Image (spheres, grey):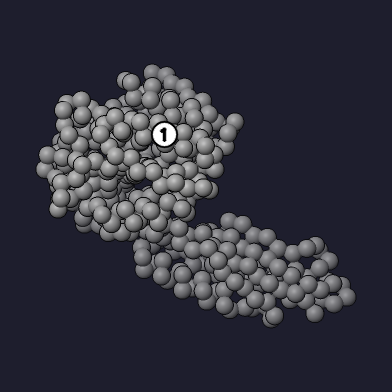
Amino acid sequence: MNYIADLKNVVEINSYTKNTEGVNLVGEIFDEWFGALGFETVIYKRNNVGDHRYYKSLHVKNSPKLLLLGHIDTVFPPGKFEYFTEDDTWVYGPGVCDMKGGNIVLLEALRQLTCKGVKIQNIDILLVSDEETGSDDSKYLTAELAREYDYCFVYEAAGSNLELVTGRKGVGTFFIDIQGKAAHAGNHYSEGCDANLELAYKLQKLVQLTDLDKGTTVNVGKIAGGIGANTVSPQAQLVFELRYKYSAEKERVLTAIEKIVQTSVVDGVKATLSGGIQRDVMQTTEASITLLKKIEKITQQQIPAEERGGVSDANIVSACGVVTLDGFGPFGDGDHTVKERASKESFVSRIKMSRKLFEYFIKNLKF
């Protein structure tokens, strides 16, 4: 299994999102690998994050196209978690499942096809460099390119039963900054405008927007404010996250948030809102279920499906109207921890699945 050696090669290079040198080094290795398969490499240079890489095959005009999507950044800074190990069942290391392992799956499947003499066409690959920090730079490029495609397979990790992902919640991160007025708590208490008190009211109203039955959560993850016990608080801040399964819920909550920000309980305070939606919801659709059933027919296996609360760049592509499925990578666990691992058996299974799907698509130029 030479692909395990390839995985080791890229895992042992630190590609923490902010380590642009390491991210680009990993990207250059993939450039060489995909170039050897006949792909044209397009590099989108960046300064504050690593470069994004886009690999293009030959295209048959006026025919459907398939985009394969991955990322090359990981979450641990240099010196924290950089080693690769393996045993009979598992490989261990940063990115073995999230998601250098997924990139290796699609690479190996394409390699096996070219070794059979199959000419790759109408299949392109996008590897971005900043997914782990929210794709704040790459999401615009991903959305722009995605509109040229009919289908997208995303190579994030599979589920524990090798599920594919048909839906993911949307997510947004927001900040409410509250400006009050400081005053001595003993001598001039009534002259102050308590930002902390206003924060307390707004926090409760935000949390009340949660609707678990509809899969909507509003979590105030961090609060800060005030100067000290003897001073009426002149400023405070809430940091909160919205996750939602349905577009209607997004609109409901965003409207309510605006009202909460604009309405003050404590006289004299003002509040401002910043932040926003990072990735819109990836809803399970009739088209995605139809594609999943077609994949089962092509691969002659039953494939379970799931929806996840976490997000990926699949959200971005799906929001562009592209029929999108996620979870084509290997099964693993412990991602974003120093115990990250991936199942060797799942690599075999996922490579075989992708090879069959690519071969079918190249032959028929449709699913």
* Residue in front for this viewpoint, 336 or 124: 124
Measuring 49% from the left and 67% from the top, which residue is drawn there?
Answer: 209
Q: Can see residue 236?
A: yes
Measuring 19% from the left and 45% from the top, which residue is drawn there?
Answer: 59
Which quarter of the rendering shows the N terminus? Answer: top left
* Residue in front for this viewpoint, 51 or 267: 51
Question: Looking at the picture, does residue 215 appear above or below residue 256?
Answer: above
Measuring 17% from the left and 34% from the top, which residue is drawn there?
Answer: 119
Tell me where residue 109 sits by quadrant.
top left
Tell me where residue 320 sits by quadrant.
bottom left
Q: Is residue 261 left or right of residue 302?
A: right
Q: Residue furthest left?
A: 364
Measuring 35% from the left and 31% from the top, which residue is drawn there?
Answer: 32
Give residue 170's position: percent from left, percent from top: 41, 58
Give residue 263's position: percent from left, percent from top: 58, 79
Q: Is residue 257 left or right of residue 68?
A: right
Give residue 321's position: percent from left, percent from top: 27, 59
* Residue in front for this viewpoint, 120 or 3: 120
Secondary structure at badge 1 equals helix
Question: Looking at the picture, does residue 213 appear above or below residue 100?
Answer: below
Residue highlighted by disc 1: 28
| Mark 1 crowd level (few <14, some 14–19, many ≥20, 10 Å Cα) | some
Q: Can see residue 288?
A: no
